[in-house]
Image (spheres, coloured by chain):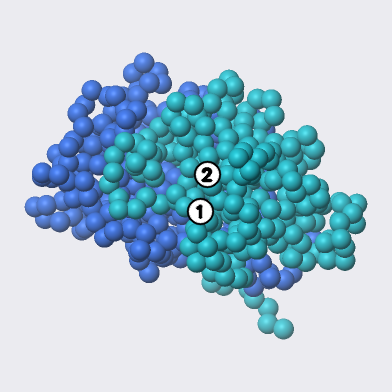
Amino acid sequence: MTPAEYYQRDRRIHPPALTPDYKTSVARSPRFSLISLQGSMSEITGPTFGHGDISPIDNDLIKNYAKDGDPIGERIIVHGRVLDENARPVPDTLVEVWQANAGGRYRHKKDSYLAPIDPNFGGCGRTITDADGYYFFRTIKPGAYPWRNWVNNWRPAHIHVSVFGHAFCQRLITQLYFEGDPLIPICPIVQTVPDPEAIDRLTAKLDMNATVPLDSIAYRFDIVLRGRRSTMFENRLEGN
Amino acid sequence: MKVVDARANRPQYLPETASQTAGPYVHIGLAPGAAGFRIFDRELGWDIAGPNAAGERIRVEGVVIDGTGSPVKDVLIEVWQANAAGIYAHPEAGGAVEEGFRGWGRVITDFETGEWGFDTVKPGPVGARARMVSGVSQRVRDSHPDWQGRAQEDSIPMAPHLNLWIVARGINIGLNTRMYFDDEGPANATDPVLNLIEWERRRATLIAKRTLRDGRPVYRFDIRLQGEDETVFFDV
């Protein structure tokens, strides 16, 4: 018997493929409808990762590329849980992040923004959630930066987040924003998300209780992946 | 018989986190070596099949093409596949795989040309979901011995395929597609997923072409994001 399927994705909370205000999407968006598939073994399985795949320092972006000191910038902790739509924790799943440095510059050979590279900051990290779906990173708050879309667009400070879940159909890449950033409502990439509440959920909230006094300020960011059907009625073929 | 009241224990559903584009610097997070620096002891996704996997060793190559006909040079593709016996490296897959076989990989393009490629083993057929099959016509079912008399079972095979997930700047939510093999004609003809695609000429967009290079099989699979012969993408 094939194990249970996942809930169908609610496409109304995700950005559509074609979002003309984000110009790059225009030539990179399929025009035909997606073909909807029931989850077969190909969709309800997915890669698994273990602690042998990563190193303990990988989730500390302040230290994981430090050469002769700590990177410049506001020291922050980003933490939260990976849950599914049933509010159950997603344990043992790989979470990867990448971001610009405090000046808004990426360590990437294709980024030529005039803000300088920080010699002590790589800008990527990864971790595996614990049994409660909990994860955390320590990093530097990324800076806003300009990008070519309209003449004068600026990305709000953000961290890219990649999550696997336990099935290939749960695979998700998103971006985390910071509560109170005035660039959020005017960013064409943020605004590809049609649902204001969904945008609010992409905004990490200041979490004073997790702040380390005199050291690092904390933000909370929970991630929700697709949930899974109960196996209760798995043998009953609807419509047959 | 005990009747379950669905309202009891009704879970508090949470809405899924919305997707956002992976952006132009996806390599920093997922393939930092390509971004131009070394940070992790081990980057993930560079060895799909491992040294012990049975089956035919193949290479897969292609380019992702945008609506203007230009190569997409900053794309990242993830691959998820079964081994040669049709088993996924997953605890619910119903079997074991060879040691070192992960069935998952990541590939990025050459920044100058947009060409990508990876080495793996050719997967075997995988069972389909019964209700997936119900969209397939009786004529198709009757035409293949594997299907006769078992059209509503989970064990109906899907033709060998790779599952691909494509992210890039300008792609707001990862695109799922499948790559099938052109030397699997009979299996492709009865594959329930290919047969779900109403327009027969669009099915060809999912079938990679086999050639030999120095005696080694290479499959070519170009992905067209839009325009003529737009690749079929799935809502999985």
Distance between the alpha carbons at the discs numbered 1 and 2: 9 Å
Residue at left offset 60%, top offset 40% = B214
**Is residue B198 left or right of B227 when viewed as pictured?**
right
Q: Residue at x 67, y 58 (%)?
A: B124
Which amino acid, by three-letter code, is at mark 1?
Ile
Chain A palette colour: blue
Relative to A142, A13 lies left or right: right
Pick whichever of labels 1 and 2 is earlier in the sequence: 1
**What residue does disc 2 label?**
B118
Compared with B84, B63 (above or below) is above
Q: Which mark is residue B48?
A: 1
Q: Which of B21 and B95 is in front in this view?
A: B95
Residue A11, visible in the rendered structure? no
- Please name the residue shown 27% across and 46% down the image: B39
In the rendered image of the structure, the colour used to display chain B is: cyan
Q: How crowded is mark 2: few (under 14 residues within 10 Å), some or many (20 or more)?
A: some
